[in-house]
Amino acid sequence: MATLRDKGVRVVPGLTSANGHVASFSDGSSIEVDAVVRAAGYDEDFGWLRVPVTVDKRAKSLDTEGISPVPGFYSEA
């Protein structure tokens, strides 16, 4: 994590919603963003993610090598 922070990546709690460029998180905070990098850990289950065309009906990511069909939305590859 330190390497990511050194590169300017801001690590935040779970994403609960997004509206335009504003992302809101499980701790009640919100920030303006240009992109979201999703890093979910070891068990791929994105059923909580309510961004159209990012997950299939089984809650599996639809990204290709970390690049989502949604512009500016990336995942850990």
Image (cartoon, helix red, strand yellow):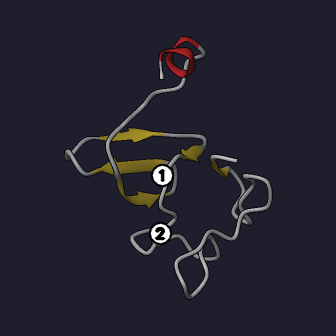
Q: Is residue 48 left or right of residue 8?
A: left
Q: Amino acid at mark 1?
A: Ala
Residue name at image x 43 percent, y 48 percent: 22
Classed neighbour count for the residue bearing mark 1: other residues with Cα under 10 Å, few (<14), some (14–19), many (≥20)? few
In the rendered view, would you say 52 is above or below 77?
below
Residue that extends furthest to the front in the rendered view of this protein: 42
Residue name at image x 48 percent, y 52 percent: 40
The percent position of residue 41, horizontal first and vertical second, equals 47, 49
Residue that extends furthest to the right in the rendered view of this protein: 64
Q: Amino acid at mark 2?
A: Asp
1 and 2 marks in contact (CB < 8 Å): yes
Residue name at image x 48 percent, y 68 percent: 46
Q: Quadrant of residue 12?
A: top left
Residue corresponding to mark 2: 45
Q: Nearer the viewer, residue 33 or 73?
A: 73
For the residues marked 1 and 2, what is the alpha-carbon distance in whole angstroms? 8 Å
The percent position of residue 67, horizontal first and vertical second, equals 75, 54
The percent position of residue 59, horizontal first and vertical second, equals 52, 78
The percent position of residue 26, horizontal first and vertical second, equals 24, 51
Q: Quadrant of residue 8?
A: top right
Residue corresponding to mark 1: 40
Residue that extends furthest to the bottom in the rendered view of this protein: 57
SS assignment at label 1: loop
Classed neighbour count for the residue bearing mark 2: other residues with Cα under 10 Å, few (<14), some (14–19), many (≥20)? some
Sooner in the amino-acid sequence: mark 1 or mark 2:
1
Q: Nearer the viewer, residue 20 or 61?
A: 61
Residue that extends furthest to the top in the rendered view of this protein: 6
Q: Is residue 64 left or right of residue 12?
A: right
Residue name at image x 45 percent, y 68 percent: 49
